[in-house]
Structures are given as structure tokens and as C-alpha cells.
Amino acid sequence: MNEIFRILEQDARKTPEQIATMTGIPLAQVEETIKKAESDRTILKYRTMVNWGKLGEEQVWALAEVKVSPQRDVGFDAIAERIYRFPEARTVYLISGTYDLAVFVVGKTMNEVAGFVSEKLAPIEGVQGTVTHFLLKRYKEDGEIMDGEEGPKRVPIMP
Amino acid sequence: MKKRDLISKRVKDIPPSGIRRFFDIIASMDGVISLGVGEPDFVTPWHIREAGIYSIEKGYTSYTSNYGLLELRKEIARYIKVRHNLDYDPERELLVTVGVSEGVDLALRAIVDPGDEVIIPDPSYVSYTSCTVLAGGVSIPVPTTIDNDFKIKAQDIDKRINPRTKVILLGYPNNPTGAVMDREELVKIAEVAQRHGLVVISDEVYERLVYGVEHTCFASLPGMKERTILLGGFSKAYAMTGWRLGYAAATEEVIEAMMKIHQYTIMCAPTMAQMAAINALRDGEAQVKEMVAEYDQRRRVMVKGLNDIGLTCFEPLGAFYTFPSIKSTGLSSDEFAERLLLEERVAVVPGPTFGQCGEGYVRCCYATSMAEIEEALERMGNFVKRHRTQ
């Protein structure tokens, strides 16, 4: 059954009919599985990866490393929640190592991102400090090479 | 002075490949979707390519042993043991070849004396018959049909055996049909081989590409290891066609004989390809499984699509080919392929390229992107609608 999700993860536009053909799973079962996954948040949403650079609409991304003091009973979760509720915080992970939360912040300008970190993120109670790294170039994202990958150079007819 | 023929009779007698003319047509056209390829559409996984590059950087640019790098042979022996529970001595019973293509040639030349007969399923990969002829042998095609999903029957082999019969050459999973032999059928063939003292050359280059069934290695059948020349390769499973690398596994006596030809004609397989192949066998398993899963999805789309547009197609369980019947169009395979290319810009390979029994069929390869498969099916659907006669 996980095959259905693997296919959708690669191409959310595949229809249940196509998936049924590709997997050999009956159509009704494919539809039911998807419906259930949508309602129980196994499928969070369907989105499109856009190469915004191509549209001349640059976004400013930064990775903010956030060091926090964990709190009794809730550990990092309460502070993480305070942070992830901001729409500017696009992705938030708890990680091991020299800092605790990795927060990917997105904005239209460097100022906007810097402002968010210094005025919203850093002052949160329990946040001990932040280190902000601005993203300079995307080479590969979520398995996709931004410039595209060269396919094989095949001879069109071969026995 | 009497003008002598420049070209040997033996070579002259080999008919030219029927697909060459399609090259020229395709070269003059834009927007062709080719289902006529015979190789994966994946590029070799990066870690394998990287191993090849690294070997060049490190200066592995000399010959290897005629047999191939011992390290690689040990990995091949381990791989065959894991896959088929067969023990081959890497020092004496394995030979690294330049693709299975060379393996077929070596095996035939090592075994066949002039006039010896070689039993070959029809249709089959194009080199079997030609290599048999070049080795001085006589090819004896055994018809296979859609009624039996293009699987060869032991009784049909048995009928064609005479004192000159020396070899049964099997290629399953099959190119062009995608047919896979099941174990019981192979056991019957093994009995025939045993009874008549025949050698079996088993080209298993597509062994990893099977869908929902198990591949049976011919050499793993009772009593068959001693009389089988097992040929395997890296091209299809690891998407390494251009590296030209395969192997032969057989008894010491046979490997020694094949090595004799190999050392005088080839010397050794390319060193960097051998280094890369070591890496493929050690770390390539996950990618093989991923690629097989992808092929399986495309296979289902292709088989359903062909049947939906009226090109009846049995379900191929191996390789990456479908072999639909084009009889509903009233066209010959050659006409179908040529007109389809000219009218709809889709390239397929006419069935008779692979033997007489391929007439009425074309080979469509699904080792191409899903988007291209879907587009090709649509174009073929339009074509069939126009030409349908029954």
C-alpha cells in the first residue's frame, strides 16, 4: 500500500486511475486509501516545487540555529510551538548537536528575515541565542537537482 | 586477374540487421518517442560512476588478469551464491567478459564445432543466431508463441534433437518478448539436456528484472551446474550498458576454453569498468530494487495501454519489453513499425528482427519515462484507430 504514497510523493498529479494501473491495486482501494490518508493527515497536502529563481522572484531563505533552555515537563516542545506558529518559520526541526532548533526562515528581503529573527525569534523566553545563516545558492532540494539532471544518451533503436 | 571476394562467405551469409534503416528515418525527424531502445533510461547510479572515476584517478589504467580482477570475481561468486545458492570458484570458474555479448560469442566458439547444431528459441536476442553461424554452427530455431506466453517447451526442443545437436541456448527473461520461464518448465528442459548430453548456454542478463515472480537460474537446477554456461552482466540491473561488462560462470574446463579465446581477442575487460562493477555488487542493491519497482509500474501502464488501444499483449513478467500483436491492423510488423514512425513519430522494433516467430508483433520497450510512455500510447492509439481492419 505504501507504493501509492511513494508514487504520489513523486508526482501528486497522478490520478487514482493511473496509480491503480501502475500498482495493480484495485481502483476502489486506491481511492479509499488516499481519502483516508487525507483525512488522518498521513497526506499533509499536495504541493508543487517551484523554481522561483526562474520567475525572477527571489526569496530570501535563512537557517536560524536556535539554542533554547528546555522546560520542565514539555522539554523543547513549548518553545518550538511558539516558533513554528510564525508563518515566517517555514520549517522547524529539533536536532542534536551544538544547538537545538533548526528554523528555516523565509522572507522577501534580507531585512525582513533579519528583523524576524532579531525581533520575534530571539526575544522568545527560553531562547538563549541564535545564529543565522543566509542561503546563497540552491543546488538540490528534496531530491531534485535545480539545474535538472542529464538523462542517458541512448541510441533510439537497438535490438 | 580474377576478382576475389573481399568479404568472407561466412560473414556475407549473415543477413543485415533489419532495423538499420530506422536509424536514418529517425535521424531526419524531430519529436520521436522511442520505444525501440534496448537499455535502461537510468544513468548508472552515481556511487558506481564515482567508483569508476576514482579508479582512473588512482591510476588503474592497466590490463587486469585475463580472467578479470580477482576482487571482482570474488564479488561475482558471492553474488551468485547469495542469489542462486551456487558455488563457483572465483579463481577457476569465472570469467569477466565485455558484456554478455562477448560471453555469448565465447561460449559458442568454445563449444561448437563446424556443423554442430544450436537450439535457439524463436524469437530471441539477435546475436544468438549470428554468433552461432560465426562459430561455424547451425542454428535451429524453436518456435515459441503467444499461446504459451512465448515460453519455450521442452517437448519442442526434444523433437529437434539429433546427433549433431550440441547446445541449447536460452535467454530468459527474454528479449524481445519479456517472457520468463518457470521452474517446472526449466526442469523439463534440464531433463532433455541431461538425456542427450547437451550444453546449456543460459543468458540471464535480465535476471534481476522480473515482476512478481522468481527468476530460476538454470545452473541451479539438479545436475545442471556441470553442463551450464551461465552468462550474467551489469548492463540491465545496474544501468551500466555503456561500461560493457558481464561474466561467465561454468566448469573450469569450459572457462579455460572461453578464456583462451578471450585472451587472444579481448585480453581483458576494461579495468575502470571492472572497478566500478565491484562497487555495484557491493553497494548497488538498493538502487536495483528501486529501478525494478519503477519498471514494474511502467510495465503495467504499458501492458494495459496497449491492450486498451487494441494491440493485444500478454503480460510479460521480465526484462523491460512488451511484445504486442499488431495483427488487428492488417499490417506486417515492418510496415507497422515504419508507418508508426512516419505517421506518429513513435519508434518500435519489428518482431521479425528477433526471428520469424516475431512476425505479427513489435517490441515496445518501457524503459522510458512515464510521460513518454503515456504520450506514445496515445499516438499509437490514434494510429491503430486509423489502420484497424478487424
Image (tube, rainbow, N blue to C red):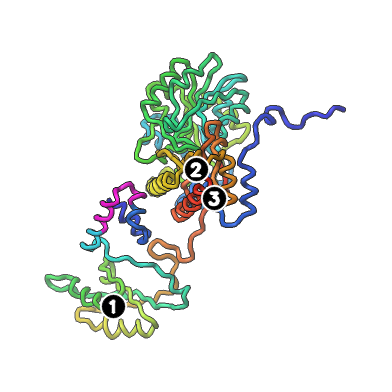
x, y percent for residue A88: 31, 78
Give yes or no for residue B138 being in the magenta stretch: no
Q: Answer few, some or many: residues within 10 Å of disc 1's Cα (few below 14, many 20 plus, some between 14 and 19).
A: few
Magenta stretch, main secondary structure, is helix
Relative horizontal placement of residue B211, taking residue B358 as reference (left or right): left
Mark identifier at residue B235? 2
x, y percent for residue A127: 23, 78
Who's the residue at 32% across and 75% down the image? A64
| Amino acid type of the residue that numbered disc 3 sits on in the rendered structure | Val
Indicate whether B7 appears above or below B390: above
Tell which of A125 and B205 is nearer to you: B205
Which subunit holds the residue at mark 1?
Answer: A
| Amino acid type of the residue that numbered disc 2 sits on in the rendered structure | Ser
Q: Secondary structure at mark 1?
A: loop
Mark identifier at residue A87? 1
Numbered disc in front, either 1 or 3: 3
Stretch of the chain drawn in magenta: A20-34
Residue B194 in view (yes/no): yes
Q: Secondary structure at mark 2?
A: loop
Write down the residue under mark 3: B346
Q: Secondary structure at mark 3?
A: strand
Who's the residue at 16% across and 70% down the image? A75
Residue contact at pointers 3 and 2, CB within 8 angstroms:
no
x, y percent for residue A9: 34, 59
